[in-house]
Image (cartoon, rainbow, N blue to C red):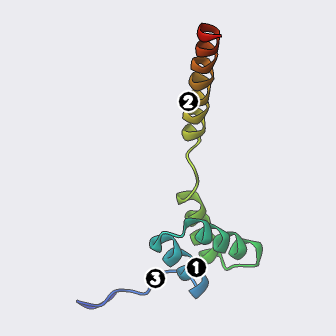
């Protein structure tokens, strides 16, 4: 347990900490690449868990793809209606 004013060290190796630091700095794609590279090797169980957590937290939500598809369908429908009306 850390004494008052001290923060405990972050879990994982230096590579995992660097990947999390990249995510916190805003480089999500770079952090994902680092996590995938860590998982491609033979990481310790703690590093594996941290890398998988990083990938899970930076994944694109599936609902976003549904909304994008819906928006594209509405756009195409409006485009077809405009072409039929003014052609």
> Residue 43's spot in the image, x, y percent?
70, 79
Question: Considering the image in quadrants, where does the C terminus appear?
Answer: top right
**Farthest left residue in view:** 4
Question: From the viewer's perspective, is 46 left or right of 2?
Answer: right
Among numbered discs 3 and 2, the one appearing first in the sequence:
3
Q: Secondary structure at mark 2?
A: helix
The residue that mark 3 highlights is 10
> Residue 75's spot in the image, x, y percent?
58, 25
Q: Nearer the viewer, residue 23 or 12?
A: 23
Which class describes the residues within 10 Å of circle 1: few (<14), some (14-19), or many (20+)? Answer: many
Q: Which label sits in the foreground, 3 or 2? A: 2
Which class describes the residues within 10 Å of circle 3: few (<14), some (14-19), or many (20+)? Answer: few
- Disc number placed over residue 5 in the picture, else none: none
For image coordinates 61% across by 83% down, the residue present is 15
Q: Secondary structure at mark 3?
A: loop
For image coordinates 50% across by 80% down, the residue present is 11
Among numbered discs 1 and 2, the one appearing first in the sequence:
1
For image coordinates 54% across by 70% down, the residue present is 27
Question: From the viewer's perspective, is 8 left or right of 36?
Answer: left
Question: From the viewer's perspective, is 56 left or right of 40?
Answer: left
> Residue 34's spot in the image, x, y percent?
65, 74
The residue that mark 2 highlights is 71
Q: Is residue 51 visible?
A: no
Relative height, residue 60 to residue 9 (above, below) = above
Q: Is residue 78 visible?
A: yes
Q: Which label sits in the foreground, 3 or 1? A: 1
Which class describes the residues within 10 Å of circle 2: few (<14), some (14-19), or many (20+)? Answer: few
- Disc number placed over residue 16 in the picture, else none: 1
């Amino acid at each position: 347990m850390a004494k008052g004013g001290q923060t405990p060290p972050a879990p994982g190796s230096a590579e995992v900490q660097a990947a999390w630091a990249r995510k916190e700095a805003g480089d999500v794609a770079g952090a994902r690449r680092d996590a995938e590279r860590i998982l491609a090797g033979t990481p310790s169980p703690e590093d594996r868990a941290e890398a998988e957590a990083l990938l899970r937290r930076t994944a694109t939500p599936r609902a976003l793809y549904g909304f994008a598809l819906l928006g594209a369908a509405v756009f195409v429908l409006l485009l077809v209606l405009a072409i039929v009306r003014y052609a």
